[in-house]
Amino acid sequence: MERRVGTVSRGIRCGIIREGDNLVDIAVESVLGAAQSEGFELRDRDVIALTESIVARAQGNYVSVDDIAADVKAKLGGGTVGVIFPILSRNRFAIVLRGIAKGCKKIVLMLSYPSDEVGNALVTLDQIDESGVNPYSDVLDLAKYRELFGYRKHEFTGVDYVEYYSNLIRDCGAEVEVVFANQPKTILNYTDCVINCDIHTRERTKRILLAAGAKAVCSLADLMTAPVNGSGYNERYGLLGSNKSTEDKVKLFPQAEGAQKLVEAIQAQILSETGKHVEVMVYGDGAFKDPQGKIWELADPVVSPAFTAGLIGTPNELKLKYLADNDFANLSGEALRDAISASIKAKEGSLVGNMASQGTTPRQLTDLIGSLCDLTSGSGDKGTPIILIQGYFDNYTSM
């Protein structure tokens, strides 16, 4: 019988995860328990996804403000340090900034404008236009910034991040000077020791600074890459992808090796208990943009830090509306359905360059599926840190 339902994404509830919990058993029991209670069955190529938060919590992957301060002082010298291009986030960056400030005598805080990397606006584009400022070249000090733009609170959080970050640094015992600029080399007019806090452009920024004569440059990915006084760490991403845990501690992105072993173990246990070959991944932020707030969601370094082999690659799909409007424009009803089904069944190899695939989403499977997971689980109190996606790899011909 023809299948009437395509992709289904389900949030799966489980208990609150603590350090040391066996996530393999918890994930398997939660998914199979949900299937039994809701009356559905697992199928081959279903996707089980776990939010990075519960993976890192089970790993106990935390670092304190003092851990960060010690690492910053060891790597940057503890004097005047430029902190450039941070995102504007109490959850993502404020506690990290406290650690940085405790490891320095003075911070030159250089903020990008009109917005940060993920779209949080300091000022609007209309305000930039009215001011006559050229954000590609003009450097503003704090006095000039206030003269032009005054105090502006974030649309969603109600926080003036310039004031908030400045006060936070002072409260940690460091001096602060605020600069607004978009060219990395600008910071070298103030100090030659730099922490570049941008996420997806970090390697380019670091290269530019070192080529311009910086003495020491660390991205957030270079901090907390090894334990400090027995702390957690992330060998690949350092402080990138971290989230506030308490006022003195952040949870890091999951350690890569442990996360990879986890997804493969869940896959193996599901196969053993059900005979079904599922795919498994760990996901963080989705890769999408909010049209209202102009915020790009992806503040993590990647959408998925660990996934099973079947999730490698990009979609290889035909555009049904293209086939219907072009190749089979003279057909309708059952004849049209049969013709399109035959085209899908006959597709071979990569469809790159094929007009019938134009407009399909050319993104990594893990980015697409991770975005769906992030939207399903949300970021609040839904209590569904495990997601089951069924039918994602089906197509129009699936029975």
Image: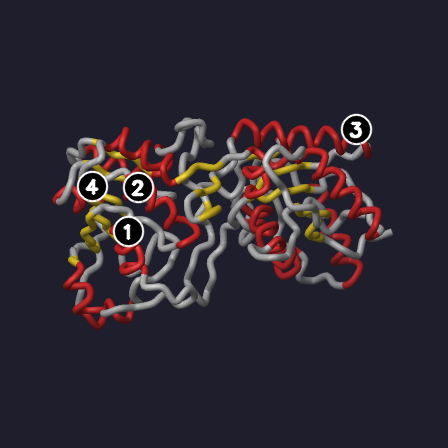
* Amino acid type, mark 4: Lys
The residue singled out by tag 3 in the image is 272
Mark 2 Cα shell of 10 Å, populated few (<14), some (14-19), many (≥20): many
User: What is the spatial separation of the Cα atoms under label 2 and label 3, in whole angstroms?
Assistant: 47 Å
Q: Position of residue 2 (x, y in %)?
A: 83, 53
* Amino acid type, mark 2: Ile
Query: Which mark lies nearer to you, 2 or 3?
Result: 2
| Mark 2 element type | helix
* Amino acid type, mark 3: Ser
The reply to whether residue 209 is in sight is yes
Q: Is residue 390 left or right of residue 204?
A: right
The residue singled out by tag 2 in the image is 100
Q: How is the image coloured?
A: secondary structure
User: Going from the N terminus, do you reach mark 4 or mark 2 first?
Assistant: 2
Q: Position of residue 195 (x, y in %)?
A: 27, 39
Q: Nearer the viewer, residue 111 or 19?
A: 19
The residue singled out by tag 4 in the image is 105
| Mark 1 element type | helix
Disc 4 and disc 2 in contact, CB within 8 angstroms:
no
Q: Is residue 354 above or below residue 70?
A: below
User: What is the spatial separation of the Cα atoms under label 4 and label 1, in whole angstroms?
Assistant: 12 Å
User: What is the spatial separation of the Cα atoms under label 3 and label 4, in whole angstroms?
Assistant: 57 Å
* Amino acid type, mark 1: Asp
User: What is the spatial separation of the Cα atoms under label 1 and label 3, in whole angstroms?
Assistant: 55 Å
* Rendered residue at 19%/63% (across/down): 145
User: What is the spatial separation of the Cα atoms under label 1 and label 2, in whole angstroms?
Assistant: 12 Å
Query: Which mark lies nearer to you, 1 or 2?
Result: 1
The residue singled out by tag 1 in the image is 171
